[in-house]
Image: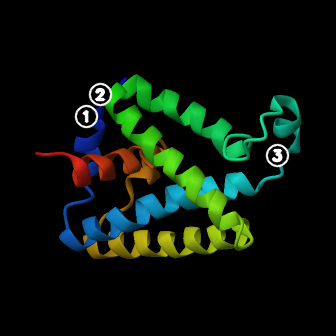
Amino acid sequence: MRTLDQWFAEYAVSHQNPKNKAIHYICVPAIYFSIVGLLMSIPSAIIANTLQLNAPIIENWAFLVLLFVLVFYIRLSIAMAIKIAIFSILCLVVNYYISQLFPLWIFSLIVFALAWVGQFYGHNIEGKKPSFLKDLQFLLIGPAWVVENLFSKK
């Protein structure tokens, strides 16, 4: 299994152009956020009825999927897993409040589509294919790479 630094080094190869990086700093979190919203939009009565916590922020499919996603990050780095967990909680909370104002699935689908258009535009500028076309695990490395690049003191 590759280390987080090895993943980052390989991911960075197709993310050198400053404009592409800037686009990724916006679009990668937006995609992650929108996926959380789309997963929260799936009817989850079975989860709520089973847990009976009256806590819609955690009684949904997004929360369950995020638990498994965090296992991936824990295997790479506890520190990164904590950072991603914090971002994931923020996504759950904000998506919950958006769901109180608008149909969440529509909002999330629009954000998802626009962010992917931005991603592919960024890679067009870069002149390199997205990393996930080589290995789907890069779809989970992208958010960690953004967190590392935006919030680390390197």
Q: Residue at x 24, y 50 (%)?
A: 151
On-image quarter of the C terminus? top left
Q: Residue at x 83, y 51 (%)?
A: 43
Task: Name the residue at the left extreme.
Answer: 154
- Given residues 65 and 11, the one toward you in this image is 65
Chain-order first, disc 3 or disc 1:
1
Residue at the disc numbered 3: 44
Residue at the disc numbered 1: 6
Q: Verify CB contact (< 8 Å) between mark 2 and mark 3.
A: no
Residue at the disc numbered 2: 3
Residue 68, above or below 110? above
Where residue 11 appears, as percent x and y from the top left, is: 29, 48
Considering the numbered disc 3 on the image, is that residue within a helix, a strand or a loop? loop
In the displayed structure, does residue 56 sit left or right of residue 37?
right
Considering the numbered disc 2 on the image, is that residue within a helix, a strand or a loop? loop
> Which one is closest to the eye, mark 2 or mark 3?
3
Considering the numbered disc 1 on the image, is that residue within a helix, a strand or a loop? helix
Q: CA distance from mark 2 to mark 3?
A: 35 Å
